[in-house]
Image (cartoon, rainbow, N blue to C red):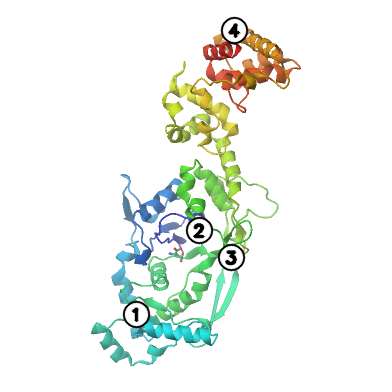
Amino acid sequence: MTIRTRFAPSPTGFLHIGGLRTALYSYLFARQNSGQFVLRIEDTDRSRAVDGAVENLVRSLKWAGIVPDEGVMLASDGTLTEKGEYGPYTQSQRLAIYREHVERLIESGHAYYCFCDKERLDRMRKEQQHAKKPPMYDRHCRALDPAKAAARAAAGEAHVVRLAVPDSEEIVFEDAVRGTVRINSATVDDQVILKSDGFPTYHLASVVDDHLMRITHVIRGEEWLPSTPKHILLYRAFGWAPPTFAHVPLLLNPDKSKLSKRQGDVAVEDYMTKGFLPEALVNFVALLGWNPGKGEVQEIFTLDELLECFSLDGVNKAGAVCDLSRLRWFNAQHIKRLAPEELLERALPFLQKQDFFRTAESQYTAQEYLVRVATVVQERLETLVDFGVEQSSYFFTRPTVEPALLRWKENTDAQTRAALEQAHRVFVAVDESDWTREHLTEVLMAAAGDKRGDFLWPLRAALTGAQRSPSPMDCAWVLGKAETLARIEKAIK
Ligand code: GLU
């Protein structure tokens, strides 16, 4: 049997990081088993459709490195396309398929037309509330004569189609994460499977599609667990074998409340524009509810490493705390792992928005110079945005240096000037061909002796004008001899 998984988002605007996790687990599981990962778009709730949402989803997934084998994807020219033999993969293009399946259920007595209008349903619900009964359809239309009901529907009377849920049947299934789940059908509502607008509901469409698309493993969030008994009943009604289900734990805020849905906190695309690396986000969501097993302390994983060690057995039942502040730490770790050239390439789009970058001048070619900047700021970055804003503006414009900043602790102006003049002499003596990080470190440390603060602080301040920055050796290395000397001379003045 070929393992086939799917990610089946509803295009309601953006990819939630919980969705990214579901997609990631489904992708990893399929790839590990030499199977296929399908991307299906569940857009049957027309009231929630948002323009551009599908592109957004597909692009966000691609950015994260999660590329489907089949289904909806990006063509080489960046437009949306579909690939695979079980399409279409967009539910709004499959309405005839759902209709046909609903008719099959009606014919076999597993579903029925319901003509109850809103007023009647509202009244019924109020009475149930009053009597403190669970809100469930009272099966009023289930008693109608099927032939007469079909004739009314054919004549154009407004209707929905409901599943005829058995009175009291044990529904048991093995969840790959949660173990055996048991529920009695008496607690399951006669749910709507076809809406009055002719669109299927989520339940019907997802069961029909998972079956027709030969999905073997449905991996999805725990919020869908209550829907699964309904799905099992649909599989039974059709006479199909259900797939294996794996419900991954809810995502929680650090205070254990359910994770916010506010876009600014949970939209993958926002992390993209805030300077986070896809590697970091993937690493972070992978660990929300999964761990590599007993005794493992590894926290940093690349996608390839996840492919090696992910398993559904390692997914926990308990809700997973999603501490977004940890994401900055993961990002910093993954930034450190990049080659400086690679870091530069990733940071470039962020830098180009900044004025100082546009006016950058240097004695090096832009590329060489920027790789040096990347090399010295790399250790200090939490996001790619920090590259410019926080860490490196002084590499692109000569800073204005506050005289007070030059003084180390209680030192006088005379002591400060002496330190800067000493540094100037040290640099003058260094040949251009020796202008390396190692050599500059060596000569400056030798000159500082046991007076590091007195010597290095004024120098660092003269070169950067900033409270915090990389070391003066690193700054001098980036700036080059001429600019380094010029900045020291300016500070002395
Ligand atoms: N369309 C559903 C969603 O938006 C899919 C749930 C499932 O995976 O079955 O999450």
Q: Is 193 located above or below residue 454 in the figure?
A: below
Q: Is 219 located above or below residue 466 in the figure?
A: below
Q: Are marks 3 and 4 in contact (CB under 8 Å)?
A: no
Mark 2 residue crowding within 10 angstroms, few (<14) / some (14–19) / many (20+)? few
Q: Which mark is residue 160?
A: 1
Which mark is in front, 2 or 4?
2
Residue sitting at 63 percent across and 22 percent down? 405
Q: Spot the residue most to the right.
A: 450
* Residue that carries the numbered disc 3 in the rendered image: 177
Q: Secondary structure beneath disc 1?
A: strand
Closer to the camera, 32 or 301? 301
Q: Which mark is residue 319?
A: none
Mark 3 residue crowding within 10 angstroms, few (<14) / some (14–19) / many (20+)? some
Closer to the camera, 179 or 273? 273
* Residue that carries the numbered disc 4 in the rendered image: 428
* Residue that carries the numbered disc 2 in the rendered image: 261
